[in-house]
Amino acid sequence: WYQGGENNMNILGDIEWKCNLNQDAHPNWMFNNTVHYKLGVSTAHGDSLRNYMFNEDNFLFTSQLGYKAVKHWYYSATLNFKTQFFNTYKTNTNDMKASFLSPGELNLGLGMTYSNKSEHGERTFNLAIAPISYNMKICRDIEHLDPTSFGIDAGHRTKHTFGSNLEAK
């Protein structure tokens, strides 16, 4: 390297798959689904136990089902789920920070969605308002992880809350 430095490797993969209902064939319905996975790996110079670390590990599934109310507005139900796949550890220890479904988050909402596409379909705007929303957090691996670090009460694997949700894309 010019003027010194350390060898370093970084890899980032980002995959997004969308499967949406054809609204030309079904003008009164909206059904949008997205699976998004991002994985980043880099060398771990400061970790004496591992040669590499995961700096990104995000799995996200979203789904939206709606029936037309007026113009661009739909009565809708939304689902969001996110977790990671690989175990992550604190530097120079075998203390786990996170693993598959630890944490995992599920959000279900009922409300209205505004959805609009530009004339040629190259731009879209989607606003989901869910005044009634259920959220569940899970920590599957309570043997190696502290659920309280994810906002879950001590001695429990899950936490259930109700509230509202707003998402704009």
Image (tube, rainbow, N blue to C red):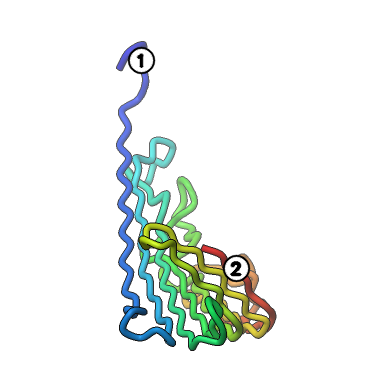
**Residue at (43%, 78%) from the top-left corner?**
63
> Which quadrant of the figure has residue 4?
top left
Mark 1 vs 2, N-terminal side? 1
Q: Residues within 10 Å of mark 1 (few under 14, many from 20)?
A: few
**Between residues 35 and 31, which one lies in front from this camera angle?**
31
Q: How crowded is mark 2: few (under 14 residues within 10 Å), some or many (20 or more)?
A: some
Q: Do the residues labelled 1 and 2 touch (CB within 8 Å)?
A: no
Looking at the image, residue 19 lies above or below residue 2: below
Please tell me whether mark 2 sits on a helix, a strand or a loop.
Answer: helix
**Residue at (55%, 74%) from the top-left corner?**
114
Per the model, the C-alpha gap separating discs 1 and 2 is: 40 Å
The image position of residue 100, as x and y in percent, is: 41, 70
The image position of residue 75, as x and y in percent, is: 55, 86
The image position of residue 94, as x and y in percent, is: 44, 56
**Between residues 72 and 57, which one lies in front from this camera angle?**
72
The answer to whether any part of residue 138 appears in the image is no
The image position of residue 1, as x and y in percent, is: 30, 17
**Between residues 21 and 101, which one lies in front from this camera angle?**
21
Q: Is residue 18 left or right of residue 118?
A: left
Question: Pointer 1: what residue?
Answer: 4
* Amino acid type of the residue that numbered disc 2 sits on in the rendered structure: Phe
Question: Pointer 2: what residue?
Answer: 150
Please tell me whether mark 1 sits on a helix, a strand or a loop.
Answer: loop
**Residue at (31%, 74%) from the top-left corner?**
19
> Which quadrant of the figure has residue 132?
bottom right
The answer to whether any part of residue 147 appears in the image is yes
**Between residues 24 and 12, which one lies in front from this camera angle?**
24
**Residue at (45%, 46%) from the top-left corner?**
92
* Amino acid type of the residue that numbered disc 1 sits on in the rendered structure: Gly
Which numbered dot is residue 76? none
